[in-house]
Amino acid sequence: MKKAYLFVLGGSSTLLLSIFLFFIVPRVQMGALERAAISAQSPYTETEARGRLAYIEYGCVYCHTQQVRDPSVGADKAFGWGRASIPSDYIYDRPHLLGTSRTGPDLSNIGSRQPSREWLHLHFFNPRLLVAWSIMPPFPFLYAEVASETSPDGRAIAIPGTDHRWIVPSEKAEDLVAYLQSLKRDRDPIPRETKHE
Amino acid sequence: MDRYVVFVVLTFAISVLGMLAFVIALIQKQVLVPPEAASSIFSKGETGIAEPDRTGDVSDRWKRLDQSARGPILFFIVSSVAWLVIGSLLGLVVSLKFHSPEFLGARDFLTFGKLRPLHLNIITYGWLSFAGLGISLWLVPRMTKVPLQGRNVLYLAGTLWNLGVLLGSIGLLYGKSDGLEWLEFWWPIDILLAVAGALVAIPLFRTVYLSEEKHLYVTMWYTICALIWFPVLFVIANSHFLHTGVEGAISNWWFAHNVLGLWVTPLGLGIIYYLLPKITGHPIASYQLSLFGFWGLALFYSQVGMHHLLGGPIPGWLANLSIVMSVGMAIPVITVAINHHVSTYRHFRVLKDSVVLRFVVFGAMMYTVSSLQGALHALRTFNYVTHFTHWTVSHAHLGLYGFTTMVFFGGIYFAAPRLVGRDWPYPRVVNAHFWIAATGVLIYAAATGIGGVRQGFALRNPEGSFEASLAVTIPYLVARSVGGTLMLASHLLMLVNLVALLGARTEEAA
């Protein structure tokens, strides 16, 4: 048993060192950033926050990042994904949704890049209606499909290439789209008047 | 900014000095124990005699110790294999969805984004944790020479853990997710898992406490520390109220890498350190070297997580720290590799007779490969290509399947017949399991690895397009499904083996 103490002690101390480096120090460093409140972001509205939960529920994060790399690192900027991300872009994000896989494109500024509600809904309903080469999963279960000569609902969207077929988005689909529209991390993070100081 | 750099350099220097002092202290104490410490896993006169896959040759002493652990360990093993079959079936469905996105796509609970975390969590917490714990705990009485204590606590812990994985999985299907990779299970269920994990430590420490052995064999070092590390990691990373934004990402990837490095890996390495010498009948090549392997892992592995966020919005010093530590991992990996591979090389012929040894040696080889791969792709030059691609998935499967899962297979094939007291009814099916699984994982890792690098170059080409980076991966994604199908098929063979072994037992009893 005497020997076990050595491993309990040694094992705990290495882990303690790692906790110190990965939690305490970044907290001190980034806490200063929070206090300065230098950020282009605003808190999520209720709808957007619900949409964010749907984004988590449907696992969007497994294929889409929300972090843009510097042009020296990747072609992110050339692909239209905006400026490189900074920590203050995420001060309202809990849990974080930075992602680590780009099976799909980055979504940091999808709200600026693709603001159209119709496009986003049709793309969720069946991505291949709009992007032939896409491998994104379809989300038909978030929509009611209706056949009608005229628009069946104020929110209904006509399916292109069909005769009088419409989709009516569910609450969840509307929330999800509102969340995506809110993602505009391409704005300048520092207020103009302080920039030249 | 400067004070942080000074700070980190200082901490690093102190910790390296601390580790050196620690190793020296250990070696000095090591001198005091008999030099035969590495032989403590053999009975008197047993050294030099290989313990084959058959149960008939087990000495009475080991039989008695094995029997003390029989019930709870079989419970852990059966649970693990059940979760493995479910988890790998889910993995295959997810893999198919990558190239056939309409496949099972019309229903909410079958959508890709729900099944993928389900696959990962069931494999990590259902299969890897149960199997690793089961085999490691089976070894505890064999190494302490004391019957396993607290069997009822283990039944309780196993039941709670099963319940946690089951409820967590159902929760994911209903959209109850914490939203962090590797930590998806809903937080109230995490409490259940943390309690169950802590309960498992009780029988371990009670048994170690009663032990009169002067020396704890290397496997025990890994098991003891893994059971200290996991509950701490799991509780800190699941305390979501502590972390926002980028700090949440830091916590997330600190955990995600440590759950491999400080939980699954030590269990796997501990099992190799036991089975390799035991089956060949000769002590491990260099016992002193295993000290460096162990403490190097403890120090370096706990700080490598940030290479998952290279190029991202994290502090530069933190990224650099993880790169240094990732490369530092080469030290423990090479020392362990020398130890394992030299031991194998000296007794290569045993591989012909022992299927279990084949699993273990394949696992040990894949540990070396995947760890060196890990050190390599933590370097910025390499990482900027492979980041965000399927390469990461390749690395994960090489480590968690090629290494740990294969070792756990070997462990189960070695332990279960000794617990039941009968040999595997279909040795050929056991052999088939090995070859199909090994082929499957190699196809899988090659497909996602090569596909990932090509995807990475496309993602770095400013004249290219995102579409090009996707199109280039499609054939590799199909190849991955082929590898995945083989892996699942091999797991079904294992299920057949296990049912046959346990079924035969009840027949005998009746």
Image (cartoon, coloured by chain):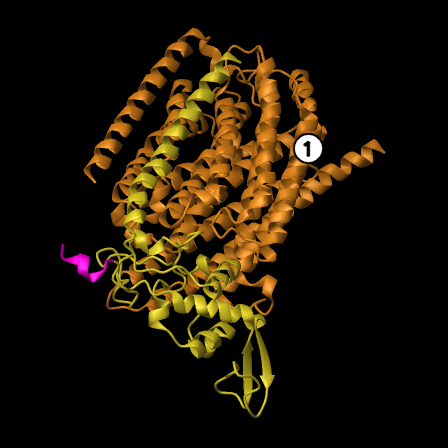
Amino acid type indicated by mark 1: Leu
**What's the residue at 45%, 29% (across, down)?**
B344
| Total marks placed | 1
| In the displayed structure image, the side of residue A46 where residue B372 appears, left or right | left
**SS type, badge 1:** helix
Image quarter for residue B369?
A: top left
The residue pinned by badge 1 equals: B156
| In the displayed structure image, the side of residue B345 where residue A156 appears, left or right | right
In this view, the residue in front, B397 or A129, is A129
Expressed as whole percent of the image width and height from the top left, the position of residue B141 reads: 61, 20
Image quarter for residue A14?
A: top left
Expressed as whole percent of the image width and height from the top left, the position of residue A51 reads: 48, 64
Give the letter of the yellow chain.
A
The subunit letter for the residue under badge 1 reads B
Q: Tell me the quadrant of the picture where the C terminus of chain A can be found.
A: bottom left
Q: Is residue B78 above or below residue B38?
A: below
| In the displayed structure image, the side of residue B50 where residue A180 appears, left or right | left
In the image, is residue A191 part of the stretch drawn in magenta? yes
| Crowdedness near tag 1: few (<14), some (14–19) or many (≥20) residues, C-alpha within 10 Å | some
Farthest residue toward the bottom? A149
Give the letter of the orange chain.
B
Expressed as whole percent of the image width and height from the top left, the position of residue A124 reads: 49, 72
In the image, is residue A114 part of the stretch drawn in magenta? no
Residue A135 visible in the current orientation: no
Q: Is residue B481 above or below residue A10?
A: below
Expressed as whole percent of the image width and height from the top left, the position of residue A160 reads: 48, 85
Q: Which residues are magenta?
A: A190-197
Image quarter for residue B173?
A: bottom right
**What's the residue at 44%, 46% (across, down)?**
B396
